[in-house]
Structure formats: C-alpha cells, structure tokens
Amino acid sequence: MNVNDFWQENKRFVLTVAGGVALFFIGVLLIDSLFGADLADQLRRKSKSEGVLAGSLYQQADLDRLRAENRALLESHELLSKATVFVTRKDFAPSTGSLANRYFEVVARTRDEVLPAAGRAGIPVPENLGLPALAPTKDDHIERTIEALDLIERTLRLSFESGIGRVEGIEIKLDPRLLSGKPLEGLEKTLVTFKLRGNATALVRLSLLLVRSAEGRVGVLERAEFLAGGAREDDARLELVLAAARLHQASPPKEDQ
C-alpha cells in the first residue's frame, strides 16, 4: 500500500491524532505561561524546605532557653500547688483500717474538743459542726468530709481567738464532679461556708488570722462577704467560704480523628 492509499483510507484518523497532539502542546504552553512562575516558586520553596529539614532546626541556645522556661514553669507549678492544696493534719489523716470507723472516731473527738471550747469562749456554734445528717459511706466522700472537718476545726479555733459573737451556720459542699462520679481533673474543691455574727472588728480580725495562722494557711479563701447587720457595731455579719482543695492531673488532649 502506498502513501496516497494510506492517506485516503486513514485521513480522518490521522487528522484527529494530529489535532489532539497539537491541542496537547498548546495546553502545555498555555499552562506554563499561566502557572509556570508559581510552579517554579513552589519548587524553589520545596528545595529550600528540604535543605532546612536536612539540617538542624534549633541551635543550642534555643534548647537552653526552652529548658530554662520549662524549669521556671515547673517551679511556678510547685509554688501554686503549695499555695492551693489543702494539707490535712495528722489527727485528721486517714489511718489503716476502715475509713467509716475513722470518720466516727474523728467526728467524736473533734466534737468533744470543740464544743466545750466554744462554751468556754461563750460563742455558740452548731452542734453538728456542719457535718451531714447522714454519715458518708463512700471512701472518697468520707476522706473529703474529714478534710472539711479539719478545716472547720481550725477556723472555729481562730474564731474563738478573734472573739466573734456566734457561728450561725456551717455547711460542707463536696465537689459536684465527685458526687456525680465524673472524672476529677485540675482543681477539686470541697467548700465550707461559715455564717458568722458579732463585732465587726472581731470578724475582720478572724479574716486576717485565717491568712496569718501559726499553723499555716487554713484553706483557700473562696469568698468573704460582709453583710449588713443591726445598727450596732457588735451585730455585723460575715459569710465566709473556704475551700479544701486538691490538685489532679489533667487528661492529655484527644487527637483529632
């Protein structure tokens, strides 16, 4: 078959292929003219990034600075923990054996000591010392309630020393997450509310004693609110909320799926 016969038989096919090839090269030239500069820039960036990654990202000075910052953060964390976490005294710390038995032992001893002391000071206090009507049954609830009783005993001793008029009410509130069984992360607080009444100067003195106690900080001051009382100076009221705090490790953040 000669060329002329081939052309006659395959002219349409040859023209189609030739047109496709021409369009391909025209497209390549068009893309290069429109995006060639951007592509070249991206290739240069890629080459530069590969060079950086192949070398050292940080110098020794950078590492030293990060280590110094880490030490400073650890020291700050330790200081904040010491200033926040409630440290239970030995007489109120859990012991070997049943926590329930320990609870009743500590409660009985504290009442036997505090109530007569309140009588000698002439300062009425609630006989239940703010404890729940029904004794807690779960171990973690018992531990927190005993801690709260430690805080209450310290605060009442300072109240007697400051010469307030009377303690009208005491209330213990465990952390809601503990009561609901949710995970405890970050700061856990057992709050103790005191409703006090008496001489305004004595109430202010108590607030200062709570911070400057010889036994150390009694608890974290959550709120102190002076309320209007009667017309006399010795009829002022103070609502005081202290926290026995615990610090828990936070869970690491979950990675995105």
Image (spheres, grey):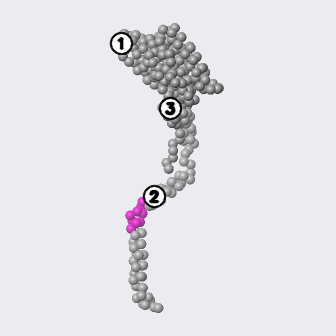
Residue kind at label 3, given as amino acid type: Leu
Q: Where is residue 131 in the image (x, y as percent from the top left)?
A: 51, 21
In this view, the mark in front (3 or 1): 3
User: Secondary structure beneath disc 1?
Assistant: loop
Residue kind at label 1, given as amino acid type: Gly
Q: Quadrant of residue 248?
A: top right
- Point 57% across, 42% down: residue: 60
Q: Quadrant of residue 93?
A: top right
Residue 20 versus residue 62 in the image, above or below? below
**Label 1 Cα crowd, 10 Å radius (few <14 / some 14-19 / many 20+):** few
Q: Position of residue 37 (x, y in %)?
A: 42, 61
Residue kind at label 2, given as amino acid type: Gln
- Point 54% across, 52% down: residue: 53
In this view, the mark in front (3 or 2): 3
Segment tinted magenta in the rendering:
30-38
The answer to whether mark 3 and mark 1 are in CB contact below 8 A is no
For the residues labelled 3 and 1, the Cα–Cα distance comes to: 38 Å
Q: In which quarter of the image is residue 24?
A: bottom left
Q: Name the residue under label 2.
A: 42
Q: Name the residue under label 3.
A: 179
In the picture, the disc for residue 230 is 1
**Label 2 Cα crowd, 10 Å radius (few <14 / some 14-19 / many 20+):** few
For the residues labelled 3 and 2, the Cα–Cα distance comes to: 58 Å
For the residues labelled 1 and 2, the Cα–Cα distance comes to: 79 Å
The answer to whether mark 3 and mark 2 are in CB contact below 8 A is no
Mark toward the start of the polypeptide (3 vs 2): 2
Please indicate, yes or no, whether residue 72 appears anywhere in the rendered image: no
